[in-house]
Amino acid sequence: MSEKARVLVAGASGFTGALAAQIVWRHPRMELAAVTSRSDAGTRLDRLYPRYRVPLELTELDLDGLDGVDAAIVAYPHGAAAPTVAALRERGIVVADLSADFRLRDRATYERWYGEHGAPDLFGGAVYGLTELYRDELREAKLVAVPGCYPTASVLALAPLAERGLLSDVVIDAKQGVSGAGRGGGDAMHYANMDENAFPYKTEGHRHRPEIEQELAALGGETPVTFVPHLLPLDQGELTSCYAQLSEPISKEEVQALYAERYAGEPFVHAVEHPPGLRDVRDTNECHVYVTVEERGRVLAFSAIDNLWKGASGQAIQCLNLMLGFDETEGLQ
Amino acid sequence: MSEKARVLVAGASGFTGALAAQIVWRHPRMELAAVTSRSDAGTRLDRLYPRYRVPLELTELDLDGLDGVDAAIVAYPHGAAAPTVAALRERGIVVADLSADFRLRDRATYERWYGEHGAPDLFGGAVYGLTELYRDELREAKLVAVPGCYPTASVLALAPLAERGLLSDVVIDAKQGVSGAGRGGGDAMHYANMDENAFPYKTEGHRHRPEIEQELAALGGETPVTFVPHLLPLDQGELTSCYAQLSEPISKEEVQALYAERYAGEPFVHAVEHPPGLRDVRDTNECHVYVTVEERGRVLAFSAIDNLWKGASGQAIQCLNLMLGFDETEGLQ
Amino acid sequence: MSEKARVLVAGASGFTGALAAQIVWRHPRMELAAVTSRSDAGTRLDRLYPRYRVPLELTELDLDGLDGVDAAIVAYPHGAAAPTVAALRERGIVVADLSADFRLRDRATYERWYGEHGAPDLFGGAVYGLTELYRDELREAKLVAVPGCYPTASVLALAPLAERGLLSDVVIDAKQGVSGAGRGGGDAMHYANMDENAFPYKTEGHRHRPEIEQELAALGGETPVTFVPHLLPLDQGELTSCYAQLSEPISKEEVQALYAERYAGEPFVHAVEHPPGLRDVRDTNECHVYVTVEERGRVLAFSAIDNLWKGASGQAIQCLNLMLGFDETEGLQ
Amino acid sequence: MSEKARVLVAGASGFTGALAAQIVWRHPRMELAAVTSRSDAGTRLDRLYPRYRVPLELTELDLDGLDGVDAAIVAYPHGAAAPTVAALRERGIVVADLSADFRLRDRATYERWYGEHGAPDLFGGAVYGLTELYRDELREAKLVAVPGCYPTASVLALAPLAERGLLSDVVIDAKQGVSGAGRGGGDAMHYANMDENAFPYKTEGHRHRPEIEQELAALGGETPVTFVPHLLPLDQGELTSCYAQLSEPISKEEVQALYAERYAGEPFVHAVEHPPGLRDVRDTNECHVYVTVEERGRVLAFSAIDNLWKGASGQAIQCLNLMLGFDETEGLQ
């Protein structure tokens, strides 16, 4: 495709949709066809998000007015996205879905965590949008289920071990900034409640755990995962600390060499030489991974991403770039 | 002792020494005999720490001018405290030492992590200052080794399981505010470096791990511990997330009942019904512990403290209260 | 009054009401009779505000069930407080009103900024609750209009000059933490919007300006005031920077002596020797004032308070202490 | 110049030098010739500042090894820059100096605030680097004195009034994030001191005041300025609130039209329609200015910039772009 692709962002008034709109707006190979929102239709996006500088008015999504739209990024809540995704696909539009609706491949698991599926015919029909694992499939894909920040950071931290079949037990302690809770969030996300605060939540079970287990298993690392998310007093950022038992011992040198080799050619994932910090990846599409072995023999893998970029909107663009035939890094640097 | 005890704070220009001085200053049964500092002698403490409101001038410690001093809190760096502690003990002064110098009971372990000991004759002669575990011993003690924030939060989170001999494998992911790094800390603690940041550190091994293992073993819970500390962008607070495998299965109800019973009579440690947040314990001597069992059967125990209070200075006062015959909670509420 | 006074807090689910409830709860001369809330009735206050540790359930206010209640703190929105205040006064209950409903003494000015008054018979019948200005009146008062944080900090910063009739022109640049916007506040107070942010608001005119002018004039300092509030990325705290032209020149030494003398006997207001910082007064009922003269001859007066304490709930208790015959500082240190 | 300009950054280990190096590194028309530092020579810049991703090693500045260097950005402390600037100019290198050494045009004023000048022959020989005021002069300049964040934000907020000769009295209340204090700063900039804090400083007189007065006078707005800086608990950002008395009255509509017209063609300065917030300009070279008239007739002008970008390094690049014949916005968007 030599001309610019015309890209729609549906649900552009939330944190991830707004950032997706901004990236498309500045993308050398994309044109922002429209930004839609039910709740904020009539408002200009740069009034809601001045720093993103997108001077378009939000409109209601009109499925009958999409002529010339090549691709869509759907940033709807889990459960609400599927029908719109199906409608867009029927019109031949390439779709990157930021919700969880097409990430899981087991129907019963989906229903347990999210309820009835809104487009059952399409269930299972998406490529999982972790480019580092599914690059070839994405080049042919018409629908991508873009993973959220927790699975992205967790799976990238553990993939090299999973691919070797080494994982036997995994604890993931994930820490995320407040933007991960979305634009809603109510009282709990009020500055006066989050300031000087940090806490775990959903400690008895989080719906991203089965997604992480699914992807590790797909790589060859079938293992039970304990996953606990925490909220931190910062805006953007996601840090995962993964504690892994292996089926056979490995030295620090070996495991660091394994990670360095695995991610050597990746444009956005870097095996770094020191424990990663969230400031290092803020406002970027990068993922920094550090792996080591601690005194008791357990393998520790840490990953840091910006939850809005590599954990959502940046990753959607990375996938769309491949699906539209562009270079994977276009518009992301 | 019916009169006020005269208490010296040595090393009062650091974060923990300054807070200890404030608590003593306002304590109904204590009188602040002096505040000492090598680096800041000649400065009034309320110039360094206006919010603590202690209008005394810092002086150099004069070991020959301690007549009438009943007790001392020593807030020196690890390794530097031992000789001063020994000198104070020789003069019959009751001592609460905030450093690590008398916490470990195995000499080789101490030397591996801290180097040569500065008062070998006293090594092993302190009571470990977790009141919830050593209350009876503290009533008779003359020297207490006050644990730091990491062992305090970790051991209190796991003690009920350790006491039952149930622990078989433990991962501790600890998260701490910036004051835990002390008044020094250099570039890394500059606001512009910590703001919007979070990261793990000392990932290959931290000297508080053997201390945690020592105390869990003393309770009956000999187990290897994986311990990784993280720094968070907040001032005061320490949150530990403990992931434990048990030697036999336990239900959520059983383990919550076990914790509720264990801490029922404690004035400062509370088994709470929701995951604890750092704001809940800020500027208090409390420890909130929440325990549950997640979907994969692992026991999760979370604890939240204020690292400067229950993780250092408040705990020192709690110990001294017992050592001096006062009520444990005097001056701490 | 030798027994404890029974004090009701109406509107205890907001930031200022909740803190007022906590101070009463711990007050040696007060007993917390009840905590009421329309929106959160049925919830325990320590579930909404764990750190305040008040284990009472919020109930709906029942005006017919107030036997034995001596005093009430009303923490309702501006405009909504007046009818409840009137009803409480009819029952002989001493009232501290945190709203603006009884602060202004000019009816037209009230109506311009707040609309129709909800209890016109009582309009003008309150003592203005700045203890440092109206201490004698407060000892006899039955209804106190507790000033908010902006007038408190501004008037205390300028009172010594106003009392001498020296003010001829005043600019007040006020900066406040997020808790000043209250528990509501919507999107704008979401952590992800306030983080790393600061901005002025209500730049064309703020309803606290006429209140500040009223109080300065009452002291003898009739002068136009330019007042602009700003929001800062912090929780509690209010800093005012006042830029005053005087009717006759004054030296730095003279003006500092004037302030030192004026506030010498005050338990909570201190003329300090360095520009004040918000950390110095956090979680206290203190006001720190620093005055100086800059190169161009303008007098600068800076004041720092905790907006929830001296700017609202602590000040209400300070007033009630006097109204109930207690020492002014009871329960506030 | 059709090829890339080779640009040296001297003093690249501080906040502004490091950012300047990053902008040059990614600039389409510039090549980063070297990054120098006395204190950190031998360290890679991306080890000190991982997020800037500049993989060059810091070296000591070698004045004899500058063949092929076209331009230099000097980010030295005030007073220390002049001799190096002079040496670079002698070698024909175009220089953007981030220090105050060449900003003032009155020698006595310079000496009062900064002491003896380090290159008196060059004193007065620089163009003042506010592109919006000196665009034509900059196209011919070989040495630019890049203004710091306080004068930049203040002068841009007031320039349209100064140019019309309307200013008669000005108060500037400036608020800045912690990065403005530089990489040093000692105890005061420790996270645990700045967190939840805000305070004025240098209240008796700040050396940026004469610089602001100089530039306003140069525009036709000779007026005394009261200037007070404050520090805020955030990383990057500078907000000025300017309170101006005018020599003749002006309406809100008139003054807003004046600003809109004045800045209509500017690529980086925008007259906005709402009070500006720091988040809106973070990590950009933009300046947002809002002007209005408050109830008492005073003109209020607010400006927001990122102190490291438009207040330092971004502005240096903006100037260099013109000096080197490039488009003013190259590398800054």
Image: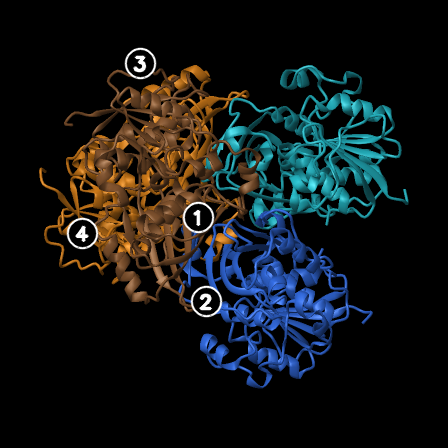
Chain colours: A brown, B blue, C cyan, D orange
Mark 3 or 4, closer to the camera: 3
Distance between mark 2 and mark 3 Cα atoms: 61 Å
Name above or below for residue B277 compared with residue C96: below
Q: Are marks 1 and 3 on the same chain?
A: no
Residue occupying the point 85% across, 40% down: C5
Please tell me how crowded label 1 is: few (under 14), some (14-19), or many (20+) other residues with Cα within 10 Å.
many
- Chain for numbered disc 1: B
Quadrant of residue A321 within the rendered picture? top left
Q: Secondary structure at mark 1?
A: loop
Distance between mark 2 and mark 4 Cα atoms: 49 Å
> According to the image, label 3 marks what residue?
A65
Q: Secondary structure at mark 2?
A: loop
Quadrant holding the C terminus of chain D: top left
Q: Are marks 1 and 4 on the same chain?
A: no
Sequence-first tag of 2 and 1: 1
- Chain for numbered disc 2: B
Quadrant holding the N terminus of chain D: top left
Which one is nearer the viewer's eye here, B9 or A326? A326
**In the image, is B271 to the left or to the right of D146?**
right
Q: Secondary structure at mark 3?
A: loop
Distance between mark 1 and mark 3 Cα atoms: 45 Å
Q: Identify the amino acid type marked 3.
A: Gly
Distance between mark 1 and mark 4 Cα atoms: 36 Å
Are the residues at dot 2 and dot 4 in contact (C-beta closer than 8 Å)? no
Q: Are marks 3 and 4 on the same chain?
A: no
> According to the image, label 1 marks what residue?
B195
Quadrant of residue B141 within the rendered picture? bottom right
> According to the image, label 2 marks what residue?
B206
In this rendering, does residue D333 appear at all? no
